[in-house]
Amino acid sequence: MGVELHKDLLGNIGVDVERHAKMMGAGLEAYKAGFMSQPNRPKAMAYFDWFMSEIQGERIAEINALRAAKKPAVGTFCIFVPEEIVTGAGGACYGLCGGSNATVADAETELPRNICPLIKSAHGFKLQRTCAYTQSSDFIYGETTCEAKKKTWEILNKHHPVHVMNIPHMKREKDLKMWQEEIKEFKEHIEEVTEKKLSLEEMLNGVKIINAKRAALQRLDALRGMNPKVMPISGKDALFITQMGFLDDPVRYTKKVNELCDELELRVQEGVSVFPANTPRIMVLGTPLAPPNWKLHTAVEGTGGAIINEESCIGHRYYKDNVDVEGVQNEDELYARLMERYSKIDCACFTPNTGRTEKIIQMYKDRKADGVIYYTLSFCHTYNVESYLVTEALAKEGIPCLVIESDYSPEDAGQIKTRVEAFLESISFKQKAQAFANK
């Protein structure tokens, strides 16, 4: 594994090498057991299996080679980061570790117990020095999407440089104007890191690269979820691919996702499905699913269901829109187009946020789904509160919905599996009743 080959580099960037190696070894074994044991996987998954083995080895070496060439390395927890600007500067923009329960106890030495486990997990990785992505970052991008994050940035900044972007919670004209200024300031901060002026042409090239990545994910989304008769890839594999899109080199990643999609298209044509006919098709709504948080997908697809879409930041919310740069003539026009694209993200931090509910219902109909699971992390107040409005709208449409609140602990895995199993059984019963009524 690459972690062993890059021990010296990891030590030089401040990683606790011994503890890190143990965590990565355990993570790889869990991946092998939970993912590589799945039957009938697409052959193109071999690349993503390799990337998992090098996720904190060879990829970390690539990022630090960029840093050595004065290219920016930016770690983030949120999809509001204008990654096009980082990519245009020749750098790397990536998600930070934050889906493990193993670091929560360390974080609770500085943070309260009753806040979001994603925040605690990520903060704990920094305190433990067991995330090579965090240690490789020139700075961490923070945003103001929730109260817990806003205050955590102040504490995290004591351990690592943090650049906070003020994301407005409404989308009025004055709010969007302020947002555009924040994007401009982010670009100027990148220039401080690189000590080099970033040109319009370079930023437009960054947009082109990231637009291509999102287009590949849109293609994958359609292939996995739009055909009710053939599901050519498991929801668990599709989730992992999307998660890796926040870590991998975007050009290489786009190429590999498109190669996978070529294979999936052939599978659809030939009727090769990884699930039996009439498997309940489930959409997952809600909070981000950071690796290695695969608990929900394991429960659903281990009890007879198939997950066909994630309406989350690690999912549809991330890749549904691209940046339109047609006719852009200057930097201010580009900032406006970036702001326009990012303001379409229907995060629960916004009020009002009716567009999210409308999108969910339309997605459900377009994909001919059979039910939805609204999944929230414990103490994620924005999504927990908004679940009332979403589930109310789903009920009016007659859409079956199961609400699950959880953290990263494995302790409730059995309970979640039992609840999911009962939910899938109710959907199957409804399907059989409908089929009988149609005779």
Image: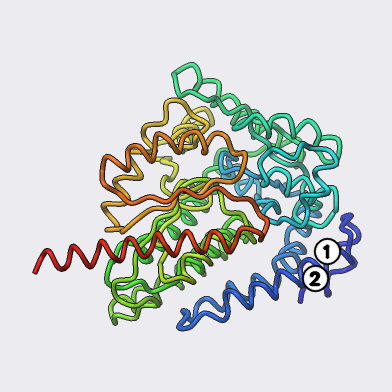
- Is residue 361 shown left or right of residue 292? left
Circles 1 and 2: CB distance less than 8 Å? yes
In what element is the residue under mark 1? helix
Percent x, y of residue 103:
78, 53
For residue 68, above or below residue 4: above
- Compare marks 1 and 2 and give the one earlier in the sequence: 2
For mark 2, what is the residue? 3
- Is residue 356 shown left or right of residue 330? left
Q: Residue at x 34, y 78 (%)?
A: 276
Looking at the rendered structure, the kind of residue marked 2 is Val
For residue 51, above or below residue 312: below
Crowding around mark 2 (Cα neighbors within 10 Å: few <14, some 14 to 19, many 20+) is many
Q: Which mark is residue 207?
A: none
Percent x, y of residue 337:
46, 34
Displayed quadrant of residue 191 = top right
Nearer to the camera, 301 or 162: 301
Percent x, y of residue 331:
54, 31
Nearer to the camera, 248 or 202: 248
For mark 1, what is the residue? 20
Looking at the rendered structure, the kind of residue marked 1 is His
Percent x, y of residue 270:
29, 82
